[in-house]
Image: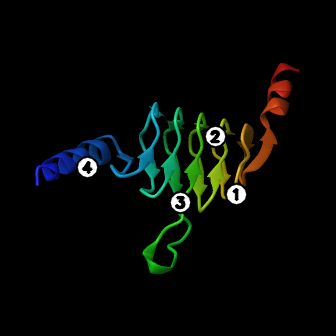
Amino acid sequence: MLGIPYLVFYRVTVEWLLCIELPWNTQIGPALRLFHGMGLVINDQTIIGRNVVLRHNTTIGVKETLPFGTQAAPIIGDDVDIGVHVIILGPIRVGNGARIGAGSVVVENTSAGAAVVTNPARMTHLAATLEIKHA
């Protein structure tokens, strides 16, 4: 009974005032950072690792509801950096240390350390991306 006022306060403050849909029961590792969280929507079945960065207008959710009402949401690894306007959908895994570029739509697994860019998302190796910047 004592938790009900807290849940109401949480929903009003976080969802209505801050415009962040981050359900209280989502599994989130330590050191999650939200940069300009407005428009952030995360499915409650999503699992987010530690040291993850999320930016505004990002959606992490499911493509469809499975039999018996279950949902298959993404699993985000540790040390993942997710850019603005990113959509991550379905029963996929985003590998540790991955970088998801702004505006990407991710519907397939990404490997650890990958850089994912464009729409539809295309996976590149992070080291190759860094070499292009320095060239």
Mark 4, Cα crowd under 10 Å, few <14 / some 14-19 / many 20+, is some
First reached walking from the N terminus: tag 1 or tag 4: 4
Q: Mark 2 or mark 3: which comes first in sequence?
A: 3
Q: Which mark is residue 11?
A: 4
Residue 101's quadrant in the figure?
A: top right
Q: What element carries label 3?
A: loop
In three-dimensional space, the C-alpha distance between marks 3 and 4, rounded to whole angstroms, equals: 21 Å
Mark 3 surroundings within 10 Å by alpha-carbon count, few (fewer than 14), some (14 through 19), many (20 or more):
many
Q: Mark 1 points at which residue?
A: 108
Q: Which amino acid does label 4 sit on?
A: Arg
Q: Is residue 117 above or below residue 25?
A: above
Where residue 93 appears, x then y in whole percent? 64, 52
What is the CA distance from the residue labelled 2 to the residue labelled 1? 16 Å
Q: Residue at x 60, y 43 (%)?
A: 77
Looking at the image, the residue that sits furthest to the bottom is 67
Query: Which of the two discs, 1 and 4, sits closer to the camera?
Result: 1
Q: List the single residue furthest toward the right.
A: 135
Q: Which mark is residue 73?
A: 3
